[in-house]
Image (cartoon, helix red, strand yellow):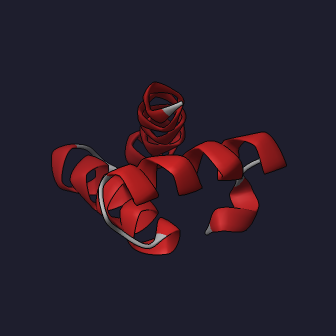
Amino acid sequence: MMELFTDAERDRITAAADRDGQEPAAWLRQVVRERLDAENLEDALVGAHFTVATRAAAAG
């Protein structure tokens, strides 16, 4: 799933995961699962990308 993000986004995801004490892939799966639980699939996938970007940027 990490391949869906740019290098800069992956760096921010890694920083956010480190901050939260998780592996980057596990951190990303958690964010996506939260969105999938809340919305239909298409909306969740689009929303997950923006949620990941926002949370990851906050880690920087």
Residue occupying the far right of the picture: 7
Residue 30 visible within the image: yes
| Residue 6 horizontal/vertical position (percent) | 79, 47
| Residue 35 horizontal/vertical position (percent) | 29, 47
Q: Which residue is painted at 71% across and 57% down in the image?
A: 4
| Residue 16 horizontal/vertical position (percent) | 44, 47
Residue nearer the viewer, 9 or 50: 9
| Residue 8 horizontal/vertical position (percent) | 77, 41
Position of 19 compared to 42: left or right? left
In the rendered image, the vertical position of residue 49 relative to residue 22, given as above or below = above
In the rendered image, the vertical position of residue 38 relative to residue 28, given as above or below = above
Identify the image quadrant of the C terminus: top right
Residue 41 visible within the image: no
Q: Which residue is painted at 74% across and 65% down in the image?
A: 3
Identify the image quadrant of the N terminus: bottom right
How many numbered circles does the render carry?
0
Position of 20 compared to 4: left or right? left
